[in-house]
Amino acid sequence: MGQDKAWLDWHGESWWQVQLAKLQELQPSRLLLSCRHEQNIATPHAEVLLDPPASDGPLPALARCLETAQMPVLALAVDMPRISTDFLRHLLSISSDPDKGVVYHGRHGYEPLCALYPITILPMLYDAMAHRDLRFQNLVQNAVQAGLLTVLSMTSDQEMLFFNLNTPEDIASL
């Protein structure tokens, strides 16, 4: 993108503000925002959790969020602006068991950056980080095999919701 995605404009707001507003609509008991220190994001609407200086990507961020929340965590990436609040509500309604999360699977694999994670996945996260296996797909597959995540098959209509915007061409295609 040539710049930090969190600060790109989406209809007059930065991407992080757009995603935060969706999560606020869900009226969660706690709202956490994980970001890098250099992003300098501050908001009175969420607890900001800063990545350590030598961040290893989303797995340590998810672990930090789960440790802080001490309850299931709904993860939502900043670069999925098509995910709607209604879809997030639907995702949350699927599992009534706090020890079991939910993840979608599509033709490109699991969609771990818009998923519900139970606190019971923490030991797997710690193990993955200790072994430097930082691939989210591997973590999710292991959690599925352990019965910690319910897998939902993505419909063709849902594919566009999960489309990550990674290039200027992706944005232009919208």
Image (tube, rainbow, N blue to C red):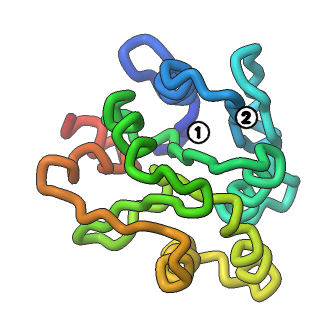
Q: Are marks 2 and 1 in contact (CB under 8 Å)?
A: yes
136 is higher (above) or lower (below) than 166: below
Residue pointed to by mark 2 = 39
- The structure residue drawn at horizontal position 69% and vertical position 67%, both measured from the top left corner, is 120
- Up/down of 6 relative to 106, above or below: above
Q: Which residue is mark 1?
A: 4
Q: Does label 2 or label 1 sit earlier along the sequence?
A: 1
Q: Secondary structure at mark 1?
A: loop
The answer to whether residue 106 is above or below residue 31 is below
Q: Is residue 96 left or right of residue 99?
A: left
- The three-letter amino acid code for the residue at tag 1 is Asp
Mark drawn on residue 171? none
Counting the numbered discs, the total is 2
Q: Nearer the viewer, residue 103 or 10?
A: 103
Locate residue 110 relative to residue 149 in the image: left or right.
left
Q: Is residue 11 left or right of residue 13?
A: left
Residue drawn where x is 50% and y is 25% of the image:
26
User: Observer-nearest residue: 3 or 122?
Assistant: 122
In the rendered structure, which amino acid carries the disc numbered 2? Gln
